[in-house]
Image (cartoon, rainbow, N blue to C red):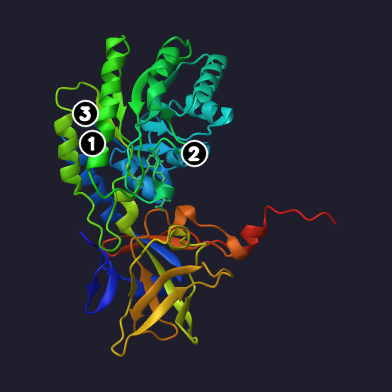
Amino acid sequence: MNVFTPKGGELYAEAVPLAQIAQQFSTPTYVYSQTALQEAYREFDEGFAGIDHLICYAVKANSNLAVLNTFAKMGAGFDIVSGGELARVIAAGGDPGKVVFSGIGKAAAEMRQALEAGILCFNIESESELERLNKVAGEMGKVAPISLRVNPDVDAKTHPYISTGLKNNKFGVAYDSAFALYQRAASMPNVSIHGVDCHIGSQLTEIDPFLAALERVLALVDRLAAAGISIRHLDLGGGVGICYRDETPPEIAVYAAKLKERLKGRSFKLLLEPGRALVGNAGVLLTRVEYLKHGEAKNFAIVDAAMNDLMRPALYDAWHDILAVEPRIGTNEIFEIVGPVCESGDFLGHDRELCLEEGDLLAVMSAGAYGMSMSSNYNTRTRAAEVMVNGNDVKLVRKRETVEGLLAGEIVYK
Ligand code: LLP
């Protein structure tokens, strides 16, 4: 269900006009729909009903505490990639016992923090990391639960920057060396093998690469079982895409049904790490037109959000729909929607047909995933406020940053 819909021509977040939110909290502001978050989670969870499963939301997609809390209350687990994300999960009321820890560069301190918290599993991405974890756990008198993140060498057919399951990616353990590394892990005193893990990429719009990865991983699971190494869970990572423009990602129910069919008769638990599919279409970035500039070759709408707020267009040439919050009746023009940052690459959208005046509000759609979580303070721009809507209830869930706050950690020696 799309919760950011026009009513009487004006764009709403659930039952609240976006214009009202802009008035109350100023711009740029990220607006999330709690109902959309809950619906997306439920769709995933219900899709996998009938088999033992745990949805571990990928925190990196949107790590706002209110978002995490929404999922925690629904029983979600979490996929983290840093000690910072673990602290967020705990602060948001998440259960550390449902946390999987991915990432290729886990520091010893992060391992200690995660062992102390009692996480569900470390997704190990290299031999050196396995050795380090064995040592760290030993020093703490603990046994660390592990999976190896196996690189199934499957083409996810997505943007090269967000494809992770190919041989030439920096992620995971090569498929051909995984078995030997599992045998090594089995001989280590301070780690315990809990699962097999893989993640092949993000914004996948086809199911076949997931099924191809599953085949490869199941073959490894069987080989391990024959060697006396049995697993408790299989983690298939995240990656299901969303519709930004005209993509046709798989329906979650269909994706789930296909995976379930292939997993029939297996006794282990299935873990999934969706990020974008749970939050992407549950958020918009609300921004105001500062200036209209009619250049020689192009018309520019200079808005108060920029690449530091939403990096995806600049970084991946990603498309986000941009809609007028209170559309005008008049002649449309073609605009470059750009931010104030001093880079030619600072754009939110190219060639958008809109009827605009200075002061108008725009909504950059599908901005719930990898929006705020990838934002920066480039050009000493304070990061946007974040607001959560539920029905007609509107709550500020992150204050707009202040310049004083930005400068606070810096030191001048006189
Ligand atoms: N698990 C692991 C190990 C991951 O690396 C990722 C995403 C996920 C799960 C969640 O993937 P999702 O379900 O969200 O596709 N910044 C990029 C996306 C980078 C994805 C990184 N890893 C973007 O804005 O498109």
Q: Is mark 1 within 8 Å of ligand 1?
A: no
| 39 versus 116 height, above or below | below
- On the question of residue 63 being in view, the answer is no
Task: Look at mark 1 in the image and give the residue it sits on.
Answer: 211
**Mark 1 or mark 2, which has the lower sequence index?**
2
Give the x, y percent position of residue 54.
28, 33
Furthest residue to the bottom?
330
The amino acid at mark 1 is Leu
Q: Amino acid at mark 2?
A: Ala
Q: Nearer the viewer, mark 1 or mark 3?
A: 1
Which of the two labelled residues, at mark 1 and mark 3, occupies the earlier sequence position? 3
The dot on residue 52 is: 3
Q: CA distance from mark 1 to mark 2?
A: 33 Å
Query: Residue 37: where, in percent of width, then height?
Result: 29, 52
| Residue at x 45%, y 79% (from the top left corner) | 289
Quadrant of the picture in which ligand 1 is shown = top left
Instruction: Examine the rendered structure and indicate whether residue 292 appears above or below residue 210.
Output: below
Side of 34 relative to 114 (left or right): left
Circle 2 sits on which residue?
87
Q: Position of residue 345 (x, y in %)?
A: 51, 67
Q: Quadrant of the C terminus?
A: bottom right
